[in-house]
Amino acid sequence: MTYDLNTEGELSAQIAAAIRDAIVAGRLIVDERLPSEAELAEQFEVSRPTVREALKRLAAQNLIRTQRGATGGAFVNRLRYEDAYGQQITTSTLLLSMNEVDFDTACEARYALERACVPLAALRRGADHLAAMRAEIHRQAQPGLSDESFCASDVAFHRALVDAAGNPVLSYHLAGAVEAMQPLMNMITFTARSRQRIVDLHTAIADALEAGEASRAEMALADLAAYTVALARDLRARRATRHGAAPAG
């Protein structure tokens, strides 16, 4: 196989893509040992350092793992949703920051996605999910809690709500929504929001889920979304007034 690309980085990226495609297509199966670096170098007609760089790219994506020793080498990894959470969160955070997504757009997406979990959570929530939510509500009610800790607890509460749906695909897709978008919302609104209001709304959500009442939980989540959007709009209006500009609609 011959490549026209002329830089090591481009070559390693193309080799990594070829191996990734083989894994996705099932030509390379879970726990299968990849050919050695020398064999891959010969197969792709490149140097061993180029192959090594391609394998590093695949390892960074959790697609392969390496083992040392006589029986070692590079093996196709068994990728789990939980292992992919970090990458999803990082990608979502970068997209939000680099593309300067506005608050209303992020808020709309984040709560729309979370609402999809509520009916399932009302049916499937377990004792551990409810205990996690109650623990975060208790933590949020502590008067000495720092803003940073309150925000972290806020994220943990919604993470437990999402996981209560018992659907790993939803949990994966919502990892970015909750753990990237929620901190963005907290950063914008934490100076103006009422902690007691947040605690009350979180309690209403947890109570409804414990009772298996999806509609009541959805109403409480909708109230939380409306409160968050109203806070952000009020803050924008105040800033615009201070700077002598007309507030945005």
Image (spheres, rainbow, N blue to C red):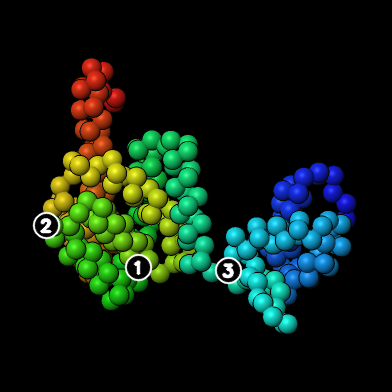
- Tell me: 169 left or right of 75: left
Question: N-terminal of the two: label 1 or label 3?
Answer: 3
Instruction: Tell me the residue at 11%/57% (across/down).
Output: 143
Looking at the image, is mark 1 or mark 3 nearer the viewer?
3
- Tell me: 24 left or right of 221: right
Vertical comparison of 128 with 91: above or below: below
Looking at the image, is mark 2 or mark 1 nearer the viewer?
2
Q: Is residue 12 visible?
A: yes
Q: Which residue is mark 3?
A: 79
Which percent across, then down, holds residue 163?
A: 38, 66
- Tell me: 94 left or right of 249: right
Q: Is residue 18 visible?
A: no
Q: Secondary structure at mark 3?
A: loop
Quadrant where the N terminus is found in the figure: bottom right
Q: Which residue is mark 2?
A: 143
Question: N-terminal of the two: label 2 or label 1?
Answer: 2
Whole-angstrom CA distance, mark 2 to mark 1, is: 28 Å
Quadrant where the C terminus is found in the figure: top left
Q: Check disc 2: other Cα within 10 Å, few if <14, some if 14-19, many if 20+.
A: few
Q: Check disc 1: other Cα within 10 Å, few if <14, some if 14-19, many if 20+.
A: many
Q: Say the numbered circle drawn on residue 135.
A: none
Q: Secondary structure at mark 1?
A: loop
Q: Secondary structure at mark 2?
A: loop
Q: Nearer the viewer, residue 123 or 1?
A: 1
Q: Say the numbered circle drawn on residue 164.
A: 1
